[in-house]
Amino acid sequence: MASNNSGRKDPLPVFCFRVVLDLAGGSDVAVSAYFKSVSGLKYETESIPVKEGGTNDTTFMLVGATKWSPLTLKQGFTESSALLKWREEWIVGQGTRIGGTIQQLDTALNVKSSWKFTRGWPTKWEISEFDASKSEVAIETLEITHEGLKKG
């Protein structure tokens, strides 16, 4: 039987991930949570076109600001939703910004890759449609706007 230590790098599954939220806004208190889905792990840098007088055959492209996409977390809704509570704190002016980490796991639940976001705050909360003709779980969606995403 051949050894499987050939240095091969297999792609990681998208169904194994965990989110760690620093709900105390910078302290050592972190809550690990599992979600149905996480999206928004992306960012882009603007390009600024500049035309130079006398140069008619090209437009120079300068590097602009980097924009971070909001993170979208989805999970089954429970009556004691910590995500909804955090969002409601912002509505009354008592919310705190938090950081967190999205961890991609292998099938043995070992962390293989991670992304850290900083100074996040809940900009949107939503619950799935109530429909008596369906037998689905209610899903809550929270959108977190943040100020940076870094490979951790």
Image (cartoon, rainbow, N blue to C red):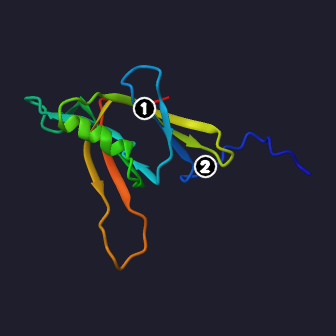
Residue type indicated by callout 2:
Pro
Q: Position of residue 49 (x, y in %)?
A: 16, 35
Q: Residue furthest bottom?
A: 133
Residue drawn where x is 38% and y is 47% of the image: 81
Q: Position of residue 114 (x, y in %)?
A: 51, 35
Residue carrying label 1:
100
Which label was assigned to residue 85? none
Query: Going from the N terminus, do you reach mark 1 or mark 2 first?
Result: 2
Q: Secondary structure at mark 1?
A: strand
Q: Estimate the spatial distance between the alpha carbons at disc 1 and disc 2, rounded to whole Å.
A: 24 Å
Residue carrying label 2:
11
Residue drawn where x is 55% and y is 53% of the image: 15
Q: Position of residue 10 (x, y in %)?
A: 65, 48
Q: Quadrant of residue 7?
A: top right
Q: Position of residue 133 (x, y in %)?
A: 35, 80
Front one among 86 and 104: 86
From the viewer's perspective, tell me whether residue 55 is left or right of residue 136. Answer: left
Q: Residue furthest top?
A: 27
Q: Quadrant of residue 112?
A: top right
Q: Residue furthest left?
A: 53
Residue type indicated by callout 1:
Gly
From the viewer's perspective, tell me whether residue 111 is left or right of residue 2. Answer: left
